Image (cartoon, rainbow, N blue to C red):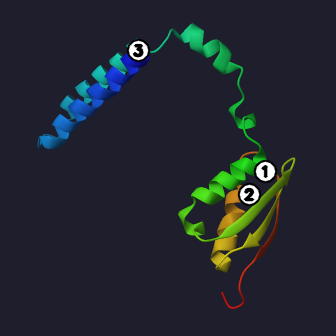
Amino acid sequence: MLRRVLAGIAFVAIVGGALAASRKSDAEVLTRVGRTTAAKVMAAMPEREQVAGPLAKVQFGTLTGVDERVRVRLRTDAALDGARITVAAEGGVVKLGGKTDTAAQRERAVQLAQTTTGVTKVDQEIAVPVGK
């Protein structure tokens, strides 16, 4: 099965490269390529019944804790580059601490935490240098 998936990916890369090199932007050609690729990927996948049963029981939001979800969002946000923020969570209440370079970074960290799935309240104790 893995070979089929890899073959499908290789097919997409080859066809995509050929299309990128050509100067055609014909929607029909792209649609045909997309349908062919989708058919090949679907053919490589196992039967729906074998996959859907176990996966339907997994609640993806519970795979990681609230604190880890907030940490990931803070770490991957470009606006928070250089910020040193700590995260602690108890239930849906998240406590942010540490330091940021600017008040805008602090506000961004609070916004990201508040909009993270599972967070009900954000307490922030992030320090910002005076005048920033």
What residue is pinned by disc 1?
Answer: 119
In contact (CB < 8 Å): disc 2 and disc 1: yes
The residues tagged by marks 2 and 1 sit, at their Cα atoms, a distance apart of 6 Å
Position in image of residue 12 (x %, y %): 29, 29
Graded by Cα atoms within 10 Å as few (under 14), some (14 to 19) or many (20 or more), the crowding at tag 2 reads some
Position in image of residue 119 (x %, y %): 78, 51
N-term-proximal mark, 2 vs 3: 3
Q: Quadrant of residue 77?
A: bottom right
**Secondary structure of residue under mark 3:** helix
Where residue 114 is drawn, which disc sits there? 2
Graded by Cα atoms within 10 Å as few (under 14), some (14 to 19) or many (20 or more), the crowding at tag 1 reads some
| Apparent side of residue 13 relative to residue 49 in the rendered image (left or right) | left
| Apparent side of residue 58 relative to residue 5 in the rendered image (left or right) | right
Where residue 44 is drawn, which disc sits there? 3
| Amino acid type assigned to the residue bearing label 2 in the image | Gln
Q: Is residue 98 above or below residue 117?
A: below
Residue beneath the point at 67% across and 59% down: 112
The residues tagged by marks 1 and 3 sit, at their Cα atoms, a distance apart of 38 Å
| Amino acid type assigned to the residue bearing label 1 in the image | Val
Q: Is residue 96 above or below residue 66?
A: below
N-term-proximal mark, 2 vs 1: 2
Residue beneath the point at 77% across and 47% down: 66
N-term-proximal mark, 1 vs 3: 3
Q: Is residue 97 visible?
A: yes
**Secondary structure of residue under mark 2:** helix
| Amino acid type assigned to the residue bearing label 3 in the image | Ala
Which is nearer the eye, 101 or 34?
Answer: 101
**Secondary structure of residue under mark 1:** loop
